Amino acid sequence: MAQNIDEAAAIGSGGAVRSAAVAEWDAAQAGRRRMVLLGRILVGVLFLGFWEYASGRLIDPLFVSSPSAVGMRLWRWTVTGSLWTHLSVTLYATAFGFVIGAAIGFALGLLFGRNQTVADIFDPYITALYSIPKIALAPLFIIWFGIGIESKIAVSASIVFFVVFLNTYAGVRDVNPIYIHATRIMGGGGGEVLRHVIIPSASSWVITGLKVSVPYALVGTVIGEFMSANRGIGFIISQATGLFDTTSVFAGLFVLGLVGALINVALRHTEAWLLRWKG
């Protein structure tokens, strides 16, 4: 009886030690996150402060504008509503281009990954198309789809397609064949192998491809807007460049950078949720 009590006390003591260690680790991580956040804020403040000081003193404002001028321009765009008008067009084309490119890329990546013969046949053609700079396709898409939003969606989709396709293909080819054979031995058909083995095993590759391709979808849309558009953030930057309006150029770049950062944060949370089974 006394021995059992001693063992229980030892187990309880070990649990308390582990709990204390976990609490200490959590506190250390929380402190590190606060330090990183403060460091980021400090770097941003120092950069903006130096930029404001250098504009007009060290560098001609024609070339770099200033944070205060950029902020006032953004405020004016927001008040007049032009910012939301142009941003909504850019985000609309980006979203559609991403969905179309990702869907086709995932489907073909899955097909080629499962069928090596098909992959070998199309390999030189896929490689040739992938080697073409996507910006070179923009004029062709404008000829095909016109100067409307369709050509921007096409440019965005063409960039997203290759990123998702290559990651999906690599993920499917990376699946351990032992798991496939084991599923078939247990009576699983092609659908069960695909649903329970291939897609879960390749999910990390696919999600990485999707995460990387979202910023590229935005890049593709802006490239299309540079070429030919009458709305969108890319159109604002292109028009401002022609007028030597550096303030509007930096304001447009700031909006694109902010949108990209927000998309990246959302993607990190989405990835953590989708891959929570790995934790």
Image (tube, rainbow, N blue to C red):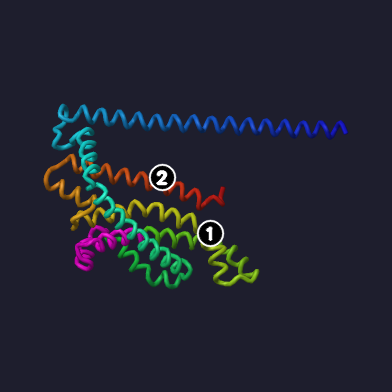
Tell me the residue at 16%/40% (across/down).
246
Label 2 with label 1: CB-CB less than 8 Å: no
Is 148 contained in the magenta span?
yes
Residue 244 screen position, x and y as percent: 12, 43
From the viewer's side, name the closer residue of 50 and 171.
Answer: 50
Q: Residue sitting at 25 percent across and 53 percent down?
A: 222
Name the residue located 13 percent from the left edge and 33 percent from the top edge.
60
User: Is residue 181 rendered magenta in the image?
Assistant: no
Q: Which mark is residue 200?
A: 1
Residue found farthest to the left? 243
Q: Is residue 191 above or below residue 221?
A: below
Q: Categorize mark 2 by other alpha carbons within 10 Å: few (<14), some (14-19), many (20+).
A: few
Image: magenta residue range: 133-162
Q: Amino acid at mark 2?
A: Val
**Circle nearer the viewer, 2 or 1:** 2
Q: Is residue 95 left or right of residue 201?
A: left
Q: Which residue occupies the foreground of this view, 166 or 37?
A: 37
SS class, disc 1: helix
Which quarter of the rendering shows the N terminus? Answer: top right
Q: Which residue is mark 2?
A: 265
Residue 21 position, x and y percent, is 62, 31
- Secondary structure, mark 2, is helix
Q: Please, what is the dominant secondary structure of the magenta stretch?
A: helix
Residue type at mark 1 is Pro
